[in-house]
Image (cartoon, rainbow, N blue to C red):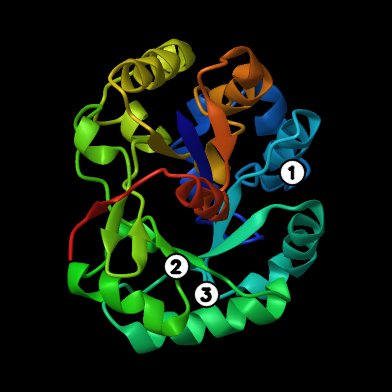
Amino acid sequence: MLLILTHDVDWSRKGPSVEHVLTRLNRFELSHRYRFFSLRENIYNGIQDIMEAEQRQGMKSTFFFRVLYDDNTTAELYSDVISELRRGGWEIGLHANNGTDLGDIQAEKKVLEKLYANEIYSLRVHYLRIEPEIIPRLSTIGVKFDSSICISKAKPSLESTGCLLYNEVVELPISVMDTYMFTYWGIKPEEVYERLIETLKLFNDLGVEIATILWHTNSIKMCGGREYLKLVEEIWRLEWITPIKVMDLAIYMNRGVSCKKVL
């Protein structure tokens, strides 16, 4: 089973407000609480943790960056990180703020491409708020892959696996999302890894060829969120999983992996 690894960078380089962290303080260990309050470290930034873990295992994933963040800072603050990701072989995708206007998506794409110094082919709309009729039109602005749909939030579902073909655009439904595991799925932090592996194994046993996982960069230092790093460390022992980034799917499609045609 191909496991497409993706991460949304929902928060700016400056991180969240003190008030936002306070409401989620119990999710962090004492060492991270200290680093936030005493050193003003952005403990929502797990990008480096992910990079280091994936690099050790020879894996690469896709990071979706927003162009404009809620605190009115831009992706420019991440320019050094984006350059490091590009040089290291990771993929940068656009985490579009507006999923209802093709022109807005194109404008944000061009801004991020300047920082990435490369073309961007993958998209995910913030909060997954995309207008379905826009998906087949994304190819006109150079988007080849979209992953803005999650068909089932309440529990693992075969409907949220595989890939769909909207004209020339490949849609990758989100099969597993960290925040859904913590909320809709009702999984306790200490049970996240076990349930994650159980879910992926179930998909594989049922013949799923492609599953897409979304793990937010801001959850990596949280209880339960750290389990992504454990998955990375253990993934090569799970011989039935092949971890890839979004763009790598094109290689496997050329080898015969198929998508269900929608339009």
Q: Residue at x 44, y 10 (%)?
A: 194
| Among the 4 quarters of the image, the one containing residue 9 | bottom right
Residue assigned mark 2:
144
Viewer-side residue, 112 vs 207? 207
Local secondary structure at mark 2: loop
* Disc marking residue 70: none
Placement of 229 over or under 262, stated as above or below: above
Which of the image's four quarters has the C terminus? bottom left
Local secondary structure at mark 3: loop
Q: Are marks 3 and 1 in contact (CB under 8 Å)?
A: no
Placement of 117 over or under 87, stated as above or below: below
Viewer-side residue, 12 vs 47? 47
Q: Looking at the picture, how far across and down is residue 131, in whole percent?
A: 21, 70
Residue assigned mark 3:
68
Residue assigned mark 1:
48
Alpha carbon distance from label 3 to label 1: 21 Å
Alpha carbon distance from label 1 to label 2: 27 Å
Q: Looking at the picture, how far across and down is residue 60, in whole percent?
A: 67, 43
